[in-house]
Image (cartoon, grey):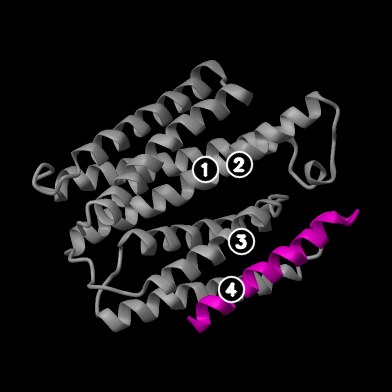
Amino acid sequence: MIMAYLSLLLYCIATGVLGRSLARPAGDGNRWWLPIVILAMVFHGEIHAEAWRSIRGVDLRFYSTLSLTALGIAALTTALSLRGKLAAAGILMYPLAGLLALRYAAQGHGHPTQMDWQLQLHAWCAISAYVTLAVATLIALLLWFQERALRRHRVQTWTRVLPPLTDLERLLFQAILVGYVLLTATLVTGVVFVHDLFAQHIVHKTVLSVLSWLVFGILLIGRWRYGWRGARAVRWTLAAMILLLLAFFGTQFVRELILNRV
């Protein structure tokens, strides 16, 4: 638990330092928050590493997967902030990552998730896809808020620290494309390595994942063929992500916490 509390504390300190940096006229040029959040993520990752060492296997239950996904989103958000002015997204993600790390540590560790290397490959493809597409959704929300503020002529401090609309939109579709490739790999490995969908009670999860894959695919085709952008792109991204959220965490929540099946 000590590492979880340290991780949460460091995430919160990084958020405060980042917020003060963004509030200055220079924007996010000051990166004192960066080593702090990296250390927070190291502690966050060590929570999982220690748990896996203690149970001698991989823990991919609900809270563990949720915490791992939050760690991945925090890491990807941090990496993107080094390329441009996307550091503002960290103000939303860092405290959430810390809270989910603490929740996982408080839950305790049960038995390892029994998976061979094929199913582990499928699981890591799924987590990677969800992380990438979750960051894309976060970018879509920032794009929507920024576009809305500009239309209403209410340019505030937080809008000034974001990239221009065109850059943010380009980053959105780059993230969606990468996430779509990973989601495709997830579905392919699922078809190849999961032999009996009905016996494992994951038909609904597969259906929702395929629906999300189709919606993201339509969005990418609409962008390429018809130049979809702005509010329309945001709506399609949110719709696809809600389906993926239900597939990825909704079904796992019902199975583990309501039906008590692991």
Mark seen at residue 48:
none
Please tell me whether residue 88 is drawn above or below residue 64 in the rendered image: above
Q: Is residue 13 magenta?
A: yes
Q: Amino acid at mark 3?
A: Tyr
Q: Amino acid at mark 2?
A: Ile
Residue denoted by label 4: 40
Q: Label 4 to label 1, Cα distance in Å?
A: 24 Å
* Residue in the picture at 67% in, 58% down: 82
Q: Position of residue 169 (x, y in %)?
A: 63, 34
Please tell me whether residue 105 is drawn above or below residue 242 in the rendered image: below
Residue denoted by label 2: 139
* Residue in the picture at 37% in, 33% down: 212
Mark 1 and mark 3 in contact? Answer it, CB < 8 Å: no
Q: Label 4 to label 3, Cα distance in Å?
A: 9 Å
For the stretch drawn in magenta, what is the main secondary structure?
helix
**Could you classify mark 4 by the number of other residues whose Cα lies within 10 Å: few (under 14), some (14-19), or many (20 or more)?**
many
Mark seen at residue 94:
3
Q: Amino acid at mark 4?
A: Ala
Mark 2 and mark 1 in contact? Answer it, CB < 8 Å: yes
**Counting residues from the N terminus, which is met first, the one under dot 2 or under dot 3?**
3
**Could you classify mark 1 by the number of other residues whose Cα lies within 10 Å: few (under 14), some (14-19), or many (20 or more)?**
many
